[in-house]
Each structure stands twice: as structure tokens, then as C-alpha cells.
Amino acid sequence: MTSAGSGLTLLQTCVLSLLVFTGASQFALVGALAAGGNPLTAAAGAFFLGVRNAFYGLRLSQLLALPRAARPLAAHWVIDETTAVALAQPGRRSARIGFTVTGVTLYVLWNLTTLLGALGAEAVGDTRAWGLDAAGPAVFLALLAPMLKTATERAVAAVAVLLGLGPLPVLPAGVPVLVAALAAPAVLYLEGRRRGGAQSGVRPQNDARPQNDVRPRSDVREEDR
């Protein structure tokens, strides 16, 4: 229904769900389009949000060790849920089963509910009158909030909000999402500088006695013995 509120047709909504099987990227794309952003800019923002799946794939390629012919299909199912289920398994066989079952189930249900939602949006009529354009950002924040467990992750989120909201009055719709992508490298760079400075400020503890107080045995006077 959110995509329908952004102006996408039923066919476009279903094709998007079939080809872009990652919720965060879909909501980012639809949200940018709903705000009147350029389609290329919206696609770029969705791409950056989906980059994390490439890092999941690096780990899963070693764990699953799938045949070469099956890798393109499996790559399409590399998302948060399938990665979590596969990594939780004790062996390669169970990891493959968990990855496949989770991938098939979520892919079928995701696209089925997308179709039902798009059909419901057409039945509702003008979805913009219902304020559904806010559903995308709300769902995205609901998905993101449980993942912010460390101070660094919360700092990245806070800086991303500032970078995303600050340029809104001067940049075209969709571009602030790309600017917000700079939050992670900026925070990680400052965190590395802080840790490096803290480590360089720690000096090894030396013997408290002055070095010139250590005298050879032969120089010790008789009364000092």
C-alpha cells in the first residue's frame, strides 16, 4: 500500500518486490519516490542500504559452500533473516536447510502480501489521503531500532539523522539519503582516532627507583651493608 501511495502501479509494485528482496531498500526507494525524488537518486539510496547483504554473502559463501549453479539464486535470498538462521545452525547441512527454508518461506510470503497490499490500495482509492506515505519511514525505523545495541551504532544513527534532515531544504528528494550514508565512515573514523589516541597515551610503567640509584656491588660502602 505504501508503494501505491507513492504512485507505483500494481505491476511495478509486484516487480519491485520480486527483484528487490530486502525490505529496507524497498522502503527507502518508495519513500524517496513518494517525496518526489528522482528515480535514479532513490535507487542509489536503496542500493546503499542493500550493500550490507554483500557482506552477509561473504560469510555465507564459506558456510554454505553451495554449487556454482545455485549461487545466483541463493544470493537473491541473502537478507538479515536467512543469514541469522544459517549462522545459528551447528553444521553445514543444517545451515543449508535453514537458509533454504527461511529464504523460500519469506520470499513467497513477502511477495504474496505485497500483492494483497497493492490490491487493497487500489480498492481504497487515493492512498495519499490516508497518510500512507508515512508508513515507509515508520516501518524502517521499527526495523532499525532493535539493531542499535552499541554506543557506536547509536552514534551512527544519530549522525545519519542529522545528515539526512539537515540538507532537506536545499537538496532534491532522495539525495539526503545518500548524504546520510556518510555517517558510518565518519563515526568509525572518529572512533578509530579516539582509540588510537587513548592507546598512545598509555605509557608502560617503569621501575619507580631512579636509574642512577643502582650502584654496582663493589661501590657499596661498608656501612651500607
Image: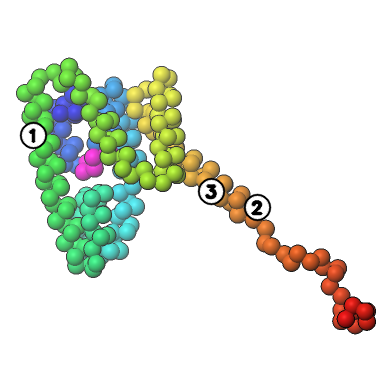
Q: CA distance from mark 3 to mark 1?
A: 47 Å
* Residue annotated with mark 1: 116
Residue at (7% x, 29% y) in the render:
119
Amino acid type, mark 2: Gly
Question: In the rendered view of the protein, which quadrant contains the C terminus?
Answer: bottom right
Task: Give left or right: position of 152 versus 7.
Answer: right
- Residue 152 drawn at (x, y percent): 45, 44
Q: Are marks 3 and 1 in contact (CB under 8 Å)?
A: no
Amino acid type, mark 1: Leu
* Residue annotated with mark 2: 201
Q: Is residue 168 above or below residue 90?
A: above
Residue numbers of the magenta segment: 20-25
Q: Earlier in the sequence, mark 3 or mark 2?
A: 3
For the image, the number of numbered tags is 3
Helix, strand or loop under label 1: helix
* Residue annotated with mark 3: 192
Question: In the rendered view of the protein, which quadrant contains the N terminus?
Answer: top left
